[in-house]
Image (spheres, coloured by chain):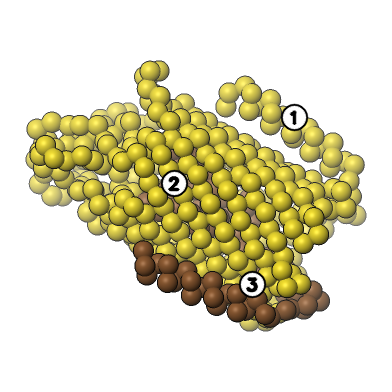
Chain colours: A yellow, B brown
């Protein structure tokens, strides 16, 4: 993290702590640690600290957080580039504020994310209106993100990427036990969207052959840098709901339809069952299924033809599906007058299946998160 | 795209029809529980959601956020 965001974060955390001491509302501060490892030889360790203060008769709220991704990888991308395993760190700060005006809440947020070859600034404005006595909530937001893509070891490589996202959601209480939400999110991206590290073989495979490659593949006559379109329109539609079977059990379902003008379409289904063994304690089992089609210009191998405009070696643009299961527990303990401790733990596992990607068929991953939060 | 817009219009119509229902504040105790919240427990799910989303060709609609190239 470079110096200005670090000073900004320190100032905001100091302001939060001073506000925390002077208010009696439900303020929080805590930290979490996420660890993930997968069969593609990638390990991620992600610590996070966060706090918030609520004041002005609980109408105004300010949040701040710092998080990092420290990752070590020898993934298929790195193995085929014949480079050594790498370790890098991404730092991110998030700041947000919101204020209630009767039935309307307005807010804004900013984030900065930085690593040695990628920098990102995001700004969001949002509002939320309660209608029909609070049974209906309409929320909308606009977000602008400016990214700068660099390349390690090449100080002259500098490519911008700008994104504008609009989001609207409608949340409806159907009964004392049921609630549903519909969301649309659309994003326009303009700029460099390929990887500066990936090369694509024309007429064969480019780079070092993976040791476990099953199918016979010829070596490319020549390799070209990955090239993606500079513009992308993305649309996501989500419908989800929760239903309480009783005071101590509930279920939830969700579905997302995603479409973009690169030809990727996907379906995501989520389901969860929650059990509250006693007040303040929750056990949740979640399942997620995801499937997508390939981008229109994606090929597992490219022929050496002059009319090819875009080429990619991005597995996220190949046809794939995944399954994920996660189990989590959240509990709350009363420590002393006005002070509660909230502890949460989650364990999850995923399998990603690549149906047409040379050198990689499946990736298995395991992850865990532990979080502790003090509530004052 | 036509199918998508039809789905969106149907959902909007269904939800706006449901808007006629008013559930009083004193009837919402169960809905205030943590298991009934959309996108809750950010401290537990933000890194997990980021790690999942950067491995897919899709994005948006749910609650994942965060920047960076998603190389991890």
Spatial CA span between label 2 and label 1: 33 Å
Report if residue B44 is visible in the image. no
The quarter holding residue A277 reads bottom right
Disc 2 on helix, strand or loop? Answer: strand
Q: Mark 1 falls within which chain?
A: A
Q: Mark 2 falls within which chain?
A: A
Circles 2 and 1 on the same subunit = yes
Q: Residue A11, labelled with which disc? A: 1
Number of the front mark, 1 or 3: 3
Disc 3 on helix, strand or loop? Answer: strand
What's the residue at 36%, 67% (across, down)? Answer: B2
Report if residue A158 is visible in the image. yes
Q: Give the residue at mark 3.
A: A172
Image location (x, y in percent) of residue A87: 43, 31
Circles 1 and 3 on the same subunit = yes
Q: Residue B26, labelled with which disc? A: none
What's the residue at 43%, 31% (across, down)? Answer: A160
Q: Give the residue at mark 2.
A: A188
**Mark 1 Cα shell of 10 Å, populated few (<14), some (14-19), many (≥20):** few
Q: Dividing the image into 4 quarters, which one contains the N terminus of chain A?
A: top right
Lateral position of residue B65 relative to residue A331, left or right: left
Q: Is residue A336 above or below residue A221?
A: below
Image location (x, y in percent) of residue A90: 51, 33
**Mark 3 Cα shell of 10 Å, populated few (<14), some (14-19), many (≥20):** many
Instruction: Give yes or no for contact between labels 1 and 3 (Cβ–Cβ under 8 Å).
Output: no
What's the residue at 48%, 34% (across, down)? Answer: A147
Spatial CA span between label 1 and label 3: 39 Å
Spatial CA span between label 3 and label 2: 28 Å
Disc with the residue nearer the chain's start (2 vs 1): 1
């Amino acid at each position: 993290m470079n110096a200005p965001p670090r000073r900004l974060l320190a100032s905001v955390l100091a302001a939060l702590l001073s506000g925390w001491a002077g208010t009696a509302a439900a303020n929080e501060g805590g930290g979490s640690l996420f660890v993930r490892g997968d069969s593609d030889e990638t390990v991620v360790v992600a610590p996070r600290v966060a706090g918030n203060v609520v004041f002005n008769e609980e109408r105004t709220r300010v949040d701040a957080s710092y998080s990092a991704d420290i990752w070590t990888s020898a993934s298929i991308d790195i193995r085929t580039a014949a480079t050594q395993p790498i370790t890098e760190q991404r730092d991110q700060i998030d700041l947000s504020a919101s204020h209630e005006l009767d039935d309307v809440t307005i807010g804004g947020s900013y984030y900065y994310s930085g690593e040695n070859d990628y920098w990102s600034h995001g700004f969001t404005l949002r509002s939320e209106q309660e209608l029909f006595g609070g049974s209906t909530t309409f929320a909308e937001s606009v977000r602008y993100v400016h990214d700068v893509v660099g390349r390690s070891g090449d100080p002259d490589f500098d490519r911008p990427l700008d994104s504008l996202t609009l989001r609207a959601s409608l949340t409806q209480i159907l009964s004392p036990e049921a609630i549903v939400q519909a969301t649309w999110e659309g994003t326009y991206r303009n700029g460099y969207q390929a990887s500066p590290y990936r090369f694509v073989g024309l007429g064969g495979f480019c780079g070092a052959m993976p040791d476990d490659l099953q199918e016979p593949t010829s070596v490319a006559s020549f390799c070209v840098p990955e090239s993606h379109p500079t513009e992308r329109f993305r649309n996501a539609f989500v419908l989800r709901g929760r239903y309480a079977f009783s005071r101590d059990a509930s279920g939830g379902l969700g579905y997302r339809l995603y479409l973009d003008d690169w030809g990727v379409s996907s379906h995501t289904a989520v389901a969860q069952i929650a059990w509250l063994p006693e007040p303040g304690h929750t056990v949740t089992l979640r399942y997620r299924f995801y499937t997508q089609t390939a981008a229109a210009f994606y090929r597992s191998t490219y022929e050496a033809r002059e009319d090819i405009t875009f080429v990619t070696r991005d597995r996220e643009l190949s046809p794939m599906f995944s399954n994920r299961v996660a189990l989590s527990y959240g509990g709350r303990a009363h420590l002393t007058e006005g002070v509660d401790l909230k502890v949460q733990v989650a364990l999850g596992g995923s399998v990603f299946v690549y149906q047409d990607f040379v050198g990689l068929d499946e990736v298995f991953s395991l992850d865990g998160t532990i979080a502790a939060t003090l509530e004052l | 795209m036509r199918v998508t817009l039809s789905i969106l219009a149907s959902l909007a119509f269904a939800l706006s029809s449901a808007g006629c229902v008013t559930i009083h504040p004193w009837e919402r105790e169960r809905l205030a529980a943590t298991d009934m919240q959309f996108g809750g427990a950010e401290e537990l799910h933000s890194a997990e959601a980021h790690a999942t989303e950067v491995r897919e060709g899709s994005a948006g609609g749910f609650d994942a956020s965060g920047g960076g190239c998603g190389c991890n």
